[in-house]
Image (cartoon, grey):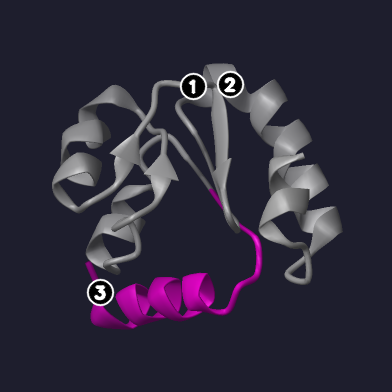
Amino acid sequence: MEPAAVRFVRDFVQSGKPVASICHGQWNFVEADAARGRRLTSWPSVRTDLHNAGAEVVDEPVDTDGDITTSRSPDDLPAFCERIVQEFARGPQATAAERRA
């Protein structure tokens, strides 16, 4: 992955702003060392890499852990889109409890 892209992902995740990723996009979190300690879902072939990068991997249509929302596949787009609209509306000022609500 391009170093500038890795820095962009790392910096954006560290900003505390809501981040969303679906399908294979979670590989960006692996490269940016942003998966460690996070609960994430993804396309099945990405899960081993997420696990090896220190993530807790779940098999759910959509999952939000703090400011990161992930989804497995295009089949999950309805749930994913609904969730990211909620997360983006809450913005970076939302507390962890508000994000889980």
Q: Which residue is mark 1?
A: 60
Q: Which residue is mark 3?
A: 2
Q: Residue at x 65, y 32 (%)?
A: 80
Q: Tag 1 or tag 2, which sits nearer the N-term?
A: 1
Question: In whole angstroms, how far apart are the C-alphas of marks 1 and 3?
Answer: 29 Å
Q: Which residues are magenta?
A: 1-20
Taking the image as shown, residue 89 lies to the left or right of residue 87, namely: right
Q: Could you say which disc has been placed on residue 52 in the image?
A: none
Q: Secondary structure at mark 2?
A: helix
- Residue 79 image position (x, y, % from top left): 69, 25
Residue at the far top: name it. Answer: 75
Q: Secondary structure at mark 3?
A: loop
- Give the dominant element type of the magenta stretch: helix, strand or loop: helix
Looking at the rendered structure, the kind of residue marked 2 is: Asp
Question: In whole angstroms, how far apart are the C-alphas of marks 2 and 1?
Answer: 9 Å
Q: Which residue is mark 2?
A: 76
Check disc 2: other Cα within 10 Å, few if <14, some if 14-19, many if 20+.
some
Taking the image as shown, residue 39 lies to the left or right of residue 101, namely: left
User: In the rendered image of this protein, does residue 93 appear above or below residue 24?
Assistant: below
Is residue 4 within the magenta segment? Answer: yes
Q: Tag 3 or tag 1, which sits nearer the N-term?
A: 3
Q: Residue at x 57, y 29 (%)?
A: 62
> Mark 2 against mark 3, which lies toward the viewer?
2
